[in-house]
Amino acid sequence: MDVQMAPDEVEAIFSALAHADPAPKTELAYTDPFTLLVSVVLSAQSTDVGVNKATRGLFAAAPDAASMAAMSEEQVGSFIRSLGLWRNKAKNVVALSKILLERHGGEVPHDRAALEALPGVGRKTANVVLNVAFGEGTIAVDTHIFRVANRTGLAPGKTVDKVEQGLLAVVPERYLGGAHHWLILHGRYVCKARRPECWRCAIARWCRFPDKALYSKRPTGPDGVSSADDSLRSA
């Protein structure tokens, strides 16, 4: 049975993450709530790097809901073919743009229910938009956050919803604005799925990962350079 992490431990974790990265932000390239929304919809089963490459041309051709709605699914698809599930994503992007015009004056609504009513937008996407575009203290639990929350003991849970509710219950209010970014970036670059880099983890002392001792030593290659550092440089 998991024992809930003490409030002072949670405070220490987010204090350390905030100290290491005082101004965390999404790695998706966007200019306004609309381009953010489209980018997040496109990011399903795709990397942020891949999405940014695809949207560079897409947003140059259609930077707002009106111009995106005027495009055909084939036209949108021509920009995003490098992404997984691109056909369905193109369909959703065109459809959600039309709904934004019809129901919201072309603007992205600051309302969870309205966001989740858009094609291709679920709770996770809505959470990202509410957090990044509108400054709400939401946490969008993806695979990285799910892993970090369970591995560290911050908010153990077998489902995404359970982890989200657990995090919202324990994260101090003043850290809620950045919690989503700190956790996802930590999972993406440090607390990796196959080989967590506990040797350079800012929150290792509070982490409850039972195998962290196995990854506490800095790995080195034949030239004495950390293979983990190499992977970060090439990411």
Image (tube, helix red, strand yellow):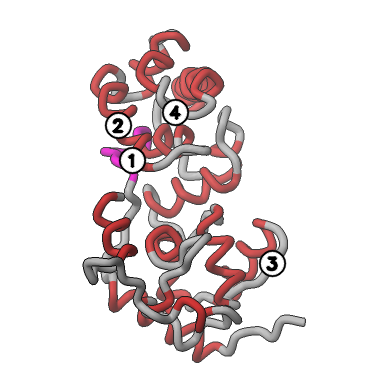
**In the figure, 52 relative to 79: above or below?**
below
Residue occupying the point 69% across, 67% down? 157
- Residue on which the image places disc 1: 49
* Mark 1 / mark 3, whichever is N-terminal: 1
Q: Does residue 178 appear in this view? A: no
**In the figure, 139 relative to 91: above or below?**
below
* Mark 4 / mark 2, whichever is N-terminal: 2
Residue occupying the point 36% across, 35% down? 50
Q: Are marks 1 and 4 in contact (CB under 8 Å)?
A: no
CA distance for labels 4 and 2: 10 Å
CA distance for labels 1 and 4: 11 Å
CA distance for labels 3 and 4: 30 Å
- Residue on which the image places disc 2: 53
CA distance for labels 1 and 2: 6 Å
Q: Is residue 183 left or right of residue 26?
A: right
Near-viewer residue (204 or 24): 204
Give residue 187's quadrant in the image: bottom left
- Residue on which the image places disc 4: 83
Q: Are marks 1 and 2 in contact (CB under 8 Å)?
A: yes
